Amino acid sequence: MSDRLNPQRLRGFRDFLPESMALRKYVIRTFEEIFERYGFLPLETPSLEYAETFEGKSSTEAETLMYKFVDAGGRRVGLRYDLTVPLARVVGMHPDLPMPFKRYHIAPVWRAERPQKGRYREFWQCDVDIVGSDEPAADAEILAIISDCLSAVGFKEYRVLINHRKILSAMARVAGASPEQAVHVYRAIDRLSKVGADGVRQELIQLGLSPDSSDRLIALINIEGDADTVLSHLERLLEDQPEGIQAINELRSILNLLSNYNVNMNSYLIQPSLARGLDYYTGAVFETVVDEPKVGSVTGGGRYDELVGIFAGKKIPTVGTSLGLERIIDVLEELGLMTPPRVSADVFVTVFDTSCIASSIQIAANLRRKGIKTELYLGKPGSLRKQLTYASRLGIPWVIIAGPDELANNEVTLRDMQSGEQKRLPLHELPEHIKSLWS
């Protein structure tokens, strides 16, 4: 072959080799088990939707990141931006779903981001949502799931930050922002961690708030302390804002219910500056952050009581969260919080020569029927050294050698690849012996 195509990959997209896939599959399986333990049901939706399905549902910034195009049939379509809007569409198309409808969805989404650490153009989200309940118990259950999932994969230091969109509205009014300015104020506040207090102050002034009003708002969003302290402080400052007081009481109810779950309540903090950038949130909002590595939030979600109604024709309260698989994996790998699972087979069956290949196939087939992950050598028969080296590179712990001498006595040689020790075993004892090695 004379001409070689230069292999290349689009920026913001990644390949995952078997070692990486083992960890990803382990995390996904762990999350699936937890979601199902809580009674959530799996859901899948298409990767490609009509563009109008996503348009006007998130924010102006989000729309600039959507992959949209006209397909061969002249239809305006778009790749899935998130898993939330497709859920809303599904509920709208299936009004007979039992309510509350608890679903989980683990799948890739696409955004035309500027690639950087923790930010990719194709990434996986692990979503859980409760559709059809406006009870604070639903919010509490979502918050409990976040803790269960992160703890299950080895996270020890993390903070779940919580706020309420109505608290943000009340703070904006106290600062003198008009209703028209409110959404833009939320977006400015949401950038606090990126541009700092001075940067937010400048954005607020550019929006038309006076320097004094901007300073009042900055002071409000920077209140710190444990959940009780922050809520009490906000209660005093927002005492003439009924909507704000209602939101404070909602957060107290959620936290009170959450305390009945077996979670570390010190991990949950009220963060008045938390806005979440998507416009569809209407109530409590939350995201999870870690101090190191600097990857941004690893989970994000909240209550959105109006989005589903756009598709259903009636208000259907919903709350949920999304766990960002890529960032969670980045944290696990960088901090060494989890030993990557072994991806190889349990045993490797060699092929001594062409006269032994049928017997090697039969041995491998029998082990597989017994539930033992078995790899059969498929290269050119012979060269036992080459086959042992191959098994070693794959990290397979046990190798079965089935040469003419062994087969003549209905035996095999089992080699421990770590110690190098070998022992003869009758063929009929092989499956149970291998299983005993893992018990």
Image (cartoon, rainbow, N blue to C red):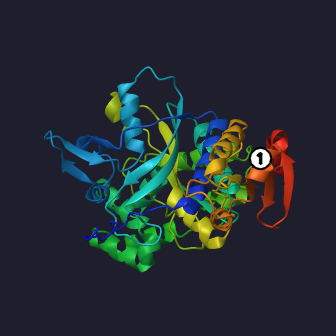
Furthest residue toward left: 74
Rendering coords of residue 310 (x, y %): 32, 35
Name the residue rendered at 35%, 26% in the picture: 93
Name the residue rendered at 49%, 54% in the picture: 167
Which secondary structure lies at badge 1? helix
Name the residue rendered at 30%, 71% in the picture: 6
Q: Determine the image quadrant of residue 287.
A: bottom right
Q: Determine the image quadrant of residue 172.
A: bottom left
Is residue 361 positioned above or below 110 on the image?
above
Q: How many marks?
A: 1
Type of amino acid at the residue the image marks with label 1: Leu
Taking depth in this image into account, of 84 and 36 the one nearest to the observer is: 36
Rendering coords of residue 123 (x, y %): 44, 57
Residue 242 visible from this viewpoint:
no
Rendering coords of residue 168 (x, y %): 45, 57
Say whether residue 262 is left or right of residue 100. Answer: right
Name the residue that disc number 1 marks.
407
Q: Residues within 10 Å of mark 1 (few under 14, many from 20)?
A: some
Furthest residue toward bottom: 198
Taking depth in this image into account, of 106 and 176 the one nearest to the observer is: 106
Rendering coords of residue 191 (x, y %): 41, 68
Say whether residue 104 is left or right of residue 143. Answer: left
Is residue 154 positioned above or below 34 on the image?
below
Residue 296 visible from this viewpoint:
yes
Furthest residue toward top: 96
- Quadrant in which the N terminus appears: bottom left
Taking depth in this image into account, of 93 and 168 the one nearest to the observer is: 93
Taking depth in this image into account, of 369 and 51 the one nearest to the observer is: 369
